[in-house]
Image: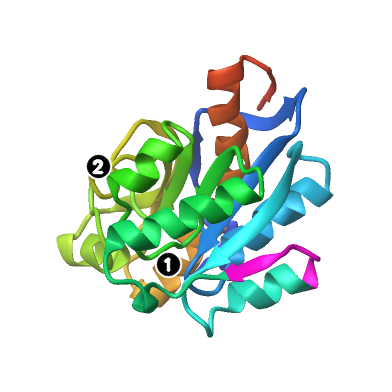
């Protein structure tokens, strides 16, 4: 069976198709690479699907395409290169100060490839959202897609969750299941998982905000 990446069946839970927030969220997005998840959040805001504004993008790799995406959308981007800091704590302190300078309320880890310390976590308790390409708690860490293929599972997917000190752990907000096809490679499977990441991340942001402020007005599928 051959399916286009955007036509593969998937299951998303919880089944909420739209979330309307009474008050706009002030987001800070952190990315290390391509920035496609940054783009999907920005597009959801532009389309009126997420009541939020992106205060700043922080990126740690000078060549990250995320910075180009931010410039294209008129979002200020700040480069904080982790290689210029003596410790993880010193690096995180600089990030925290930058986010606070831009009046950020919620932090979105959209492909941020650095472990966070308690310096960061304590500054934004329960307000840091991560997106990971597996059905957590399975396949934590890097190469999650390769781990899924090597294990022989028939279903994998992606998870949006509240981040905590332990890598790829914390309360789960939303998950999307993606079938593993017999002829999948890391590239083809990751492409289908990423489509679902783009689907659930804006909704997960709204869900997280609703649980802390009780201002969610959900519109359910079906």
Residue at screen point 74% across, 48% down = 44
Q: Secondary structure at mark 2?
A: loop
Residue 218, horizontal then vertical, whole percent = 68, 21
**Lateral position of residue 6 relative to residue 154, left or right:** right
Q: Is residue 66 above or below residue 6?
A: below
- Chain-order first, disc 1 or disc 2: 2
Q: Secondary structure at mark 1?
A: helix
Q: Is residue 128 above or below residue 111?
A: above
The image quarter in which residue 216 lies: top right
Q: Viewer-proximal residue, 127 or 153? A: 127
The image quarter in which residue 92 lies: bottom left
Q: Viewer-proximal residue, 140 or 28? A: 28
**Can you tell which mark lies on residue 190?**
1
Image quarter where the C terminus lies is top right
**Lateral position of residue 188 relative to residue 28, left or right:** left
Whether residue 15 can be seen here: no
Rounded to the nearest whole Å, what is the CA distance between mark 1 and mark 2? 18 Å
Residue at screen point 53% across, 20% down = 211
The image quarter in which residue 114 lies: bottom left
105 inside magenta stretch: no
Q: Name the outermost residue toward the bottom.
A: 63
Residue 199, horizontal then vertical, whole percent = 60, 48
**Magenta-tinted stretch:** 72-78
Image quarter where the N terminus lies is bottom left
**Can you tell which mark lies on residue 68?**
none
Residue at screen point 67% across, 62% down = 39
- For disc 2, the marked residue is 137
Whether residue 182 can be seen here: yes
Within-10-Å neighbours for mark 2: few <14, some 14–19, many 20+: few
Residue 186, horizontal then vertical, whole percent = 35, 73
Residue at screen point 55% across, 74% down = 34
Number of the front mark, 1 or 2: 2
């Amino acid at each position: 069976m051959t399916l286009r990446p955007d036509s593969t069946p998937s299951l998303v839970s919880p089944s909420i198709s739209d979330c309307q927030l009474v008050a706009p969220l002030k987001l800070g997005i952190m990315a290390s690479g391509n920035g496609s998840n940054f783009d999907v959040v920005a597009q959801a805001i532009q389309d009126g699907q997420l009541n939020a504004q992106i205060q700043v993008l922080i990126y740690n790799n000078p060549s990250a395409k995320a910075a180009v995406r931010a410039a294209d959308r008129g979002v200020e981007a700040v480069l904080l290169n982790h290689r210029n800091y003596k410790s993880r704590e010193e690096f995180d302190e600089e990030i925290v100060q930058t986010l606070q300078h831009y009046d950020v309320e919620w932090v979105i880890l959209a492909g941020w490839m650095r472990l966070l310390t308690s310096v960061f976590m304590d500054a934004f308790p329960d307000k840091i959202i991560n997106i990971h390409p597996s059905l957590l708690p399975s396949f934590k860490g890097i190469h999650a897609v390769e781990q899924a293929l090597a294990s022989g599972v028939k279903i994998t997917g992606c998870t949006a969750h509240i981040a905590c000190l332990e890598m790829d752990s914390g309360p789960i907000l939303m998950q999307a299941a993606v079938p593993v096809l017999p002829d999948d490679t890391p590239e083809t499977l990751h492409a289908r998982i990423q489509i679902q990441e783009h689907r659930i991340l804006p909704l997960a942001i709204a869900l997280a905000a609703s649980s802390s402020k009780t201002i969610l007005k959900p519109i359910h599928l079906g």
